[in-house]
Image (cartoon, grey):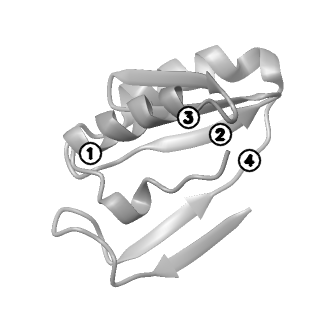
Amino acid sequence: MHREDVSATTTSQQPGVWTFIEFEAPSSASDTLSQELASALLPTGGWYADFSVDDDHVVIFAGKVFRYRKGDPDARAAAQAHGRSVGVPEHQLDWPD
């Protein structure tokens, strides 16, 4: 699925139009997909990707992957703290678990 969001909630390093790309893959591909995304994401501008694998949530930043059990507040907080440290705006750290 592809959709766009024209948003006034971006940072100066982010485009005003966001493109969301949703896809499905087998759970067995999650580690490879995580590493590929971590290698491809820009380290500046607050970029991240996230997806679910069974009962886990995976949040990926440039060079860093967080995988935690859905509903684990400490692990979620660690991923969000890293997001803040690399420039993700607070309101974009609200991914669903």
Q: Quadrant of the N terminus?
A: bottom right
Residue shown at 68% from the left, 36% from the top: 71
Q: Helix or strand or loop: what does disc 4 sit on?
A: loop
Q: Amino acid at mark 1?
A: Arg
Residue 40 in percent (x, y) is at 38, 32
In-front residue for pair 73/59? 73
Counting residues from the start of the chain, the first of labels 1 and 4 encountered is: 4
Q: Amino acid at mark 3?
A: Pro
Is 29 situated above or below 94?
above
Give the label, 4 or 2, closer to the camera. Answer: 2
| Residue named by callout 4 | 23
Counting residues from the start of the chain, the first of labels 2 and 1 encountered is: 2
| Residue named by callout 3 | 73
Q: Quadrant of the C terminus?
A: top right
Q: Amino acid at mark 4?
A: Phe
Residue 62 in percent (x, y) is at 33, 31
Q: Helix or strand or loop: what does disc 3 sit on?
A: helix
Question: Label 1, label 4: how many angstroms apart (C-alpha)?
Answer: 26 Å
Residue shown at 21% from the left, 39% from the top: 85
Question: Label 3, label 2: how many angstroms apart (C-alpha)?
Answer: 17 Å
| Residue named by callout 1 | 84
Asked if disc 3 and disc 4 are in contact, CB closer than 8 Å, the reply is no
Counting residues from the start of the chain, the first of labels 4 and 2 encountered is: 4
Give the label, 3 or 2, closer to the camera. Answer: 3
